[in-house]
Image (cartoon, rainbow, N blue to C red):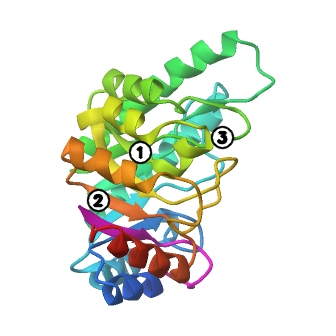
Amino acid sequence: MRYGLTAFLGPYPDPRGWVELARELGLRAIELRAEPGFAHPDELGTGDRRWLRRVLAGLEVSLHVALHDLNPASLVPRVATASVAEISSCIDLAADLGAGVLVLHPGYVPEDQPSSYRGRAEAQMAFALQVLADKAHRHGVRLALENKQRGRGDHFVHTADQHAAWIDRVPGLTACVDVGHLHTLGLDPQVYLRFMGGRVAHVHLHDNRGAHDEHLALGDGTVPWPQVFASLDELGYEGTSVLELPTPEAVRTSLQRLSAWGGR
């Protein structure tokens, strides 16, 4: 299994600090966040992208679309169109940087919408994801749909059966399984990963105490990590597992514990 880290906003003013940390710790991969002021497609000119490619050389790269304000399932036409356009620009950036995977969150319906809204929103999301998956395929990028954590709104991917259904519905779409997210919903990671099987192309690792999304160092929460790694081994998973942790200290602590847990 290959381990990497996520370049969070905050500790460093640009991705270079995270790249240097990844190299120092012997990690093989890094996931960039396509956020304004950090690594957003609209803000990276030709020279910036050339610089990034040079900085990232030798690392396996993945890209995560912006976390907020996007909803490819929106029934407000301009919102859906803008969301698809934003994700499409991230596909272009991923291809330009040599990123093999682009991670995106599923769409959602607000809590106060009538039940009839969901079916229409799902149809909108299926259309959007197919357009995006087709483009990603043409650019040599795998589009990976991530499961969401407990929270407000009705997100379309919480459980393994929902996750698998979307992957099976949209040709070319793959799965990013976020272990911390599924733990906030009280789901068994072994059951989840076994159900997903070969659909899994990318994994996010972080811990929490089960109530909400905390992004703690591995071992600081209650995720049953031995079962997680046993399930990934059982699947024969050979993709990248990204430590999605907001501080260098949490990354270091997690790697020390991974080593103590068996050298994974």
| Residue 24 numbered tag | none
Taking 53 as reference, is 180 left or right? Answer: right
Location of mark 3 (residue):
150
On-image quarter of the C terminus: bottom left
Q: Relative to the observer, which residue lies in front, 197 or 116?
A: 197
| Secondary-structure class at tag 1 | strand
Q: Residue 177 shows which numbered tag?
A: 1
- Residue type at mark 3? Arg
Residue 152, percent from left and from top: 74, 38
The answer to which of 26 and 110 lies nearer the viewer is 26
The amino acid at mark 2 is: Thr
Q: Secondary structure at mark 2?
A: strand
**In the depicted structure, whether residue 66 falls above or below residue 211:** below
Q: Earlier in the sequence, mark 1 or mark 2?
A: 1
Q: Which residues are magenta?
A: 1-15
Residue 47 covered by magenta stretch: no
Q: Quadrant of residue 247?
A: bottom right
Most common SS among magenta residues: loop
